[in-house]
Image (tube, rainbow, N blue to C red):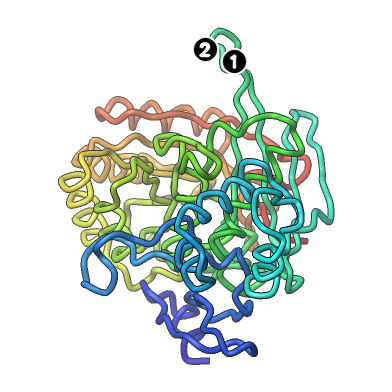
């Protein structure tokens, strides 16, 4: 209970702890301490290299498929075979892994059960967006979104983006987001994170080209599992999606930003800012009320210095709250020092539990123009999936 209480207070890191399964093995556990008795989704593709337990910035990572194979007395190359069956071929059971011996398949099924997510519902928007309600082995549900589009700048090539969830529920309680209203349930495991991408790709019948971790939950409050999941998505032995096509969006967890800067992959960082004025941001994001914007800006400057990459800033425009000239000037001052790109969109109906409304189109356009005039790059995001509650801030696993 102390761990959950710490998360509910919005602290930057939840304590990790471990336990034993009924079989006597010690499964890899994550921040929420959910014991899946060694479920294969609890494992990552590879062990983290060199940073485990040293207090460094890089992720400590998951127990790996190689660890599992070593425990079963199998050679290391079996780990890559396992990954290929799980993620490239997407088989539903160990019995389908025909280049593994029958004995090994039986031992894997006992030691690390394979329990695929169940698709409970799919909703299709008029714009082609699809929203999935997925149930995992313990009945916990999350929502995931698939966004197809034709890229006019790439000879008409078709792109498919998956917006995935990092947690079931959320602890931060941002007033413009529906996820937190359902409370926090638990962290997702690495395989559950990658599974969302596999499910969407299979349903569309095409390769997923882009991934954004912008669904339910705060990724950096489930840091190790999220990084292990992203490596399953990124690795050629996994789903093979390039690091620069994978974006992680955080509300601004400082310790997570520090660690993320030192990761070797080219993953992209986005920060949900929504206001560069302390009083306004505290109102909109009460779970981070104790976090000073000066500290957030300093953390992002260090991120840029260490990683050599620019972050993007997410900004939801809310009528009369954060769309004023004063707010625009503060955003310019915050973003310009970081050379950050700002992605803007108006508040989506259904995301807020308060009497809030999205900014009028003309107000939004003037706000964006003021920010651009201040020397900051701005994109107005196209709203997708609003008619099926699949847009930003609307996911709630219902």
Q: Which residue is mark 1?
A: 157
Q: What residue sits 53% from the left and 28% below the top?
A: 362
Horizontal and vertical percent position of residue 317: 50, 43
Q: Nearer the viewer, residue 385 or 294?
A: 385
Please tell me which residue lies in front, 362 or 33. Answer: 33
| Whether residue 50 can be seen here | yes
Query: How many other residues sit within 10 Å of disc 2, few (<14), some (14-19) or many (≥20)?
Result: few
Q: Is residue 215 left or right of residue 332?
A: right
Q: Position of residue 124 (x, y in %)?
A: 81, 38
Q: Is residue 161 above or below residue 115?
A: above
| Nearer to the camera, 21 or 154 | 21
SS at circle 1: strand
Q: Position of residue 182 (x, y in %)?
A: 67, 70
Q: Which mark is residue 154?
A: 2
Rendered view: 65 above or below 300: below
Residue 37: mark: none
Residue at point 38%, 26% (across, down): 369
Return the residue found at the far top.
155
**Quarter occupied by residue 53:** bottom left
Q: Secondary structure at mark 2?
A: helix
- Number of marks in picture: 2
Place of residue 106 in the rendered image (x, y in percent of width and height, measured from the top left): 71, 68
Q: Quadrant of the C terminus?
A: bottom right
Please determine whether, in this image, residue 78 is positioned above or below residue 35.
above
Q: Residue at x 55, y 84 (%)?
A: 25
Asked if residue 200 lies left or right of residue 267, the reply is right
- Please give left or right for residue 332 compared with residue 94 in the image: left
- The picture quadrant where one finds residue 170 is bottom right
Q: Is residue 283 visible?
A: no
Within 10 angstroms of label 1, few (less than 14), some, or many (20 or more) residues? few
For the residues labelled 1 and 2, say whether their Cβ atoms are less than 8 Å apart.
Answer: yes
C-alpha distance separating marks 1 and 2:
5 Å
């Amino acid at each position: 209970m102390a761990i959950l209480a710490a998360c509910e207070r919005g602290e930057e890191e939840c304590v990790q702890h471990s336990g034993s399964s009924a079989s006597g093995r010690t499964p890899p556990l994550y921040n929420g301490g959910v014991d899946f008795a060694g479920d294969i989704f609890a494992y990552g593709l590879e062990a983290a290299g060199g940073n485990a337990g040293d207090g460094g910035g890089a992720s400590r990572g998951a127990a790996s498929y190689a660890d599992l194979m070593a425990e079963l007395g199998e050679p290391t190359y079996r780990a890559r075979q396992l990954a290929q069956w799980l993620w490239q071929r997407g088989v539903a059971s160990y019995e389908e892994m025909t280049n593994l011996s029958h004995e090994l398949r039986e031992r894997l099924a006992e030691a690390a059960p394979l329990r695929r997510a169940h698709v409970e519902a799919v909703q299709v928007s008029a714009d082609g967006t699809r929203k999935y309600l997925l149930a995992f082995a313990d009945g916990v549900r999350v929502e995931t979104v698939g966004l197809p589009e034709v890229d006019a700048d790439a000879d008409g090539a078709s792109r498919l983006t998956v917006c995935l969830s990092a947690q079931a529920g959320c602890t931060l309680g941002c007033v413009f987001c529906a996820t937190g209203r359902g409370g926090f349930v638990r962290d997702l495991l690495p395989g559950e994170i990658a599974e969302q991408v596999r499910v969407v790709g299979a349903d569309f019948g095409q390769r997923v080209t882009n991934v954004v971790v912008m669904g339910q939950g705060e990724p950096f409050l489930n840091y190790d599992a999220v990084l292990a999941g992203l490596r399953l998505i990124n690795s050629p032995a996994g789903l093979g999606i390039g690091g620069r096509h994978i974006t992680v969006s955080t509300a601004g967890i400082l310790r997570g930003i520090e660690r993320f800067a030192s990761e070797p992959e080219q993953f992209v960082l986005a920060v949900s800012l929504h206001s560069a004025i302390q009083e306004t941001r505290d109102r909109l994001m009460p779970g981070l009320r104790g976090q000073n914007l000066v500290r957030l800006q300093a953390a992002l400057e260090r991120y840029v210095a260490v990683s050599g990459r620019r972050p993007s800033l997410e900004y939801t425009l809310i009528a009369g709250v954060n769309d004023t000239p004063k707010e625009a000037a503060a955003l310019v001052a915050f973003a310009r020092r970081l050379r950050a790109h700002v992605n803007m969109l108006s508040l989506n109906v259904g995301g807020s539990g308060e009497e809030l409304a999205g900014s009028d189109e003309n107000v939004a356009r003037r706000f964006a123009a003021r920010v651009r005039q201040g020397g900051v790059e701005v994109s107005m995001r196209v709203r997708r999936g609003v008619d099926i509650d699949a847009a930003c801030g609307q996911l709630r696993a219902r």
